[in-house]
Each structure stands twice: as structure tokens, then as C-alpha cells.
Image (spheres, rainbow, N blue to C red):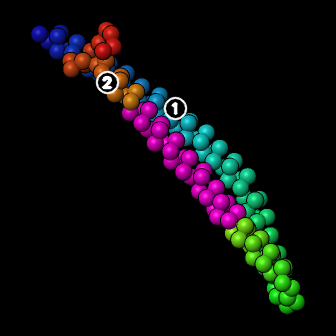
Amino acid sequence: MTKTVIDLVRAVLNATLILLALCLFLAWKLIATADAVTARASQIAGAVAPLTTVVTELHQEMAEVREAVQATPETGTAHRLSRIEARLENIQTHLNALRTLPQEAAAQAAQAGAADLAGRLISTAAWIRQDGSCAATRN
């Protein structure tokens, strides 16, 4: 009877250690994936930063031109400048949306990684019987 209890404790301990090792491995893979996504997000943000600077400078230059045109009004120039400013504001809106894109991508990748990790843990847990031993085949 004592030997059976000791064997049962060993089996439970082995199953627990195997699950712990599996969880650590999957967490390591999840962190590696999150690091890759973060690096890519930083790269995207770095590509957007110069565009933002250019648009800001262009917007300031257009404001200066508008002030100069209003000082000496001509009929068609003011209307053209208004259209250009509208386009610039549209570009600025799109750039603002691009700035949030890396953060959204990282959040979505983290959610996908967590869902994948949970799915793998659940499928692995199905192999373990109530007594702590591993099942011979998958269900």
C-alpha cells in the first residue's frame, strides 16, 4: 500500500514538472514573439516619425504662404490654398492613425499569443489523467 502511494506521488510530481516545463517553454516562445512584434512596431514608428516632421513643416509653410496671400489677395490663390490645407489635414489624420498602428499590432499579437498558449495548455492537459499519469493517445 505504501509503495502504491509513493508511486502515485511520483507520478503526480512528474506530471506537474512536465506541465511546468511545457508552460515555461510556451511562455518563452510567447515572449520571443512579443519581442519580435515590439521590434517591428518600433521600426514602423521610426518610419512614420520623419513623415510627421515633413507634414508639420509643410503645414507651417502653408500657413506662412496663406498669410502672405491674404496680405495681397488674388481670387484663385486663396481657394487653392484652402484645398491644399484640407489635404494636409487629411494626411495629418492618416499619420496620426499610423502612429497608433504599432501599439494596436502589439496588443493584437499579445492576444493571439495568449490564445495560442491557452489552446496548447488545454490540449496538453487533455493528455493527463485524473491520477496524474499521461494518456497513451490523444482524444
At x 52% / y 41%, what residue is drawn?
109
Q: Can residue 126 be seen in this view?
A: yes
Q: In this view, does 103 lie to the left or right of 121?
A: right
Q: Residue furthest bottom?
A: 71
Mark 1 residue type = Lys
Q: Mark 2 points at which residue?
A: 125
From the viewer's perspective, is residue 115 above or below residue 74? Answer: above
* Span highlighted in magenta in the image: 90-118
- Name the quadrant containing residue 66: bottom right
Q: Quadrant of the C terminus?
A: top left
Q: Mark 1 points at which residue?
A: 29
Q: Which comes sooner in the sequence, label 1 or label 2?
A: 1
Residue 84 placement (x, y as % from top left)? 77, 71
Is the Cβ of the residue at disc 1 closer than 8 Å to that at disc 2?
no
Q: Helix, strand, or loop for circle 1?
A: helix
Q: What residue is shown at x 64% (from left), y 64% (from top)? A: 93
Q: In which quarter of the image is the N terminus?
A: top left
